[in-house]
Image: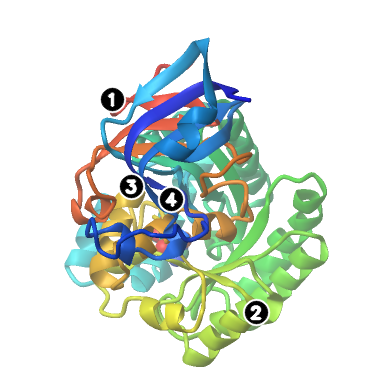
Amino acid sequence: MPRAADLIIRNIGQLLTLRVLPERPGRPAGADGVGATEPGWLGLIEDAVVAVRNGCVLAAGSRTDVEPHLAEKQDTVVIDAAGGVVSPGLVDPHTHLLFAGWREAEFALRLEGRTYLEILASGGGILSSVARFRAAADEELLSWGRSALDRMLLSGTTTVEAKTGYGLVAAQELRALRLYRRLGAEHPVTVVSTFLGAHAVPAEYRNRPGAAAAYLDEVCLPLLPKIAGDGLAEFCDVFCEAGVFGVAESRRLLTEAARLGLPVKLHADEFEPTGGAELAAELGAVSADHLARASDRGLEAMARAGVTAVLLPVTTFTLGLRDYAPARKMLDLGLEVALATDFNPGTSPVESMPLVMGIACRALRLTPAETFRAATVAAARAVGLEGRAGQIQAGVPADLVIFEATDYRQVPYRLGTNLVRTVLKKGKIVVSEGRLRRRR
Ligand code: NIG
Ligand code: FE
């Protein structure tokens, strides 16, 4: 019996489902120069149709397979994809969303040769954002967050992870988590929040002996029972790096978070091989992020433990560092590799996942197909949403992007051009003709 759809997307040139499909028999190898060479997990289907009902995907597949089983109601919305590419809504699994202002002066200082960690050690960097965050009113932060989420949505992102870490005192860290909850409730983009109280040692602790340990003991650790108990955050993260929080301190915080039921993540081995990747494996972290300088042993341990590697190539690019994360080695080891913007005022004032994907091809040597996996299903895994985001399949929320492109490889290839025309969130059109639909 044909099934009635609320919305149908027709005339899809290439549909990327990111689910493994049975091999189609009889497909001539190389016939179209695309399909035959694509990895099966991309789930690439040409001349495809997607149908939506009650906010979820009802059916997705080739026109000839799906169309005969669909019925249109009087009010079914029909979208013509004009031969374009449809992918799952992009998932950005690592951002510092709320920060109350840019840091262009620091950008200029770094161009003159000061390093990121030097600027932080002298009280600038993250700490200057902390001062501004603390001084900002809720309304100011909310309007900042809304416009950042709007720009992300316009670039195809439908789910975003958002970290605290510019409050660095109990009331301000809790405020950030409450604001994330409000933003997630009112904005179409799904917001997954992470407690990153251990982002830096705040200025008021700087002159104390054992400053990092004292800050963890007095601020971060005592907050964990409330955050875990009230479900205020979905993850606990730490900036584990020489000169910030060491491995022993990070272990102490994350072990306690995990004990209380908060899954953990780490900013690991961004600047120096600190042992962060090893710690992520030891703790069974959901993800370890950055990893530009992770040791081979650490990466092998992560692969054995099933920790997702979240790579942030725009950060490496912005900081002008030579070493990018060894993405090809990670893939060879069998690690799941995800990509994220790292959206923050210091190292990545960038909201666009397609831009990250484009840089990932050039700097990390990922293939275009690998960048789509890294920005969808792998990124969903990195935020605990495997099977609920990042894939197009029946029963999963209909978060979809239509790109104005005749081939999915154009998305990372056309660096800096926004090809996103239409975005669906839970089956609702939230971007159309490349513009936000007005929300009530
Ligand atoms: O992921 N590495 C630490 N945290 C951020 C930067 C935050 C900032 O500079 O404000 C990052 O790059
Ligand atoms: Fe970060």
Frontmost of labels 2 and 3 is 2
Residue toward you, 144 or 44: 44
From the viewer's perspective, is residue 74 above or below residue 350? above
Residue 339 visible, this orientation: no
Q: Residue at x 49, y 35 (%)?
A: 66
Q: Residue at x 42, y 37 (%)?
A: 64
Residue type of the residue flagged with mark 1:
Glu
Q: Residue at x 59, y 36 (%)?
A: 179
x, y percentage for residue 27? 35, 59
Residue 170 visible, this orientation: yes
State the CA–CA distance, disc 4 to disc 3. Answer: 22 Å
Q: Secondary structure at mark 1?
A: loop
In this picture, residue 196 sits left or right of residue 352: right
State the CA–CA distance, disc 4 to disc 2. Answer: 35 Å
State the CA–CA distance, disc 1 to disc 3. Answer: 17 Å
For label 3, the crowd category at 10 Å Cα-Cα, with few meaning under 14, some 14 to 19 and many 20 or more, is many
Residue type of the residue flagged with mark 4:
Ser
State the CA–CA distance, disc 4 to disc 1. Answer: 35 Å
Residue type of the residue flagged with mark 2:
Ala
In the rendered structure, which disc, 1 or 3, sits on the residue that comes first in sequence? Answer: 3
Q: Residue at x 25, y 49 (%)?
A: 407
In the rendered structure, which disc, 2 or 3, sits on the residue that comes first in sequence? Answer: 2
- The residue singled out by tag 3 in the image is 352
In the rendered structure, which disc, 4 or 2, sits on the residue that comes first in sequence? Answer: 4
Residue toward you, 294 or 207: 294
- The residue singled out by tag 2 in the image is 305
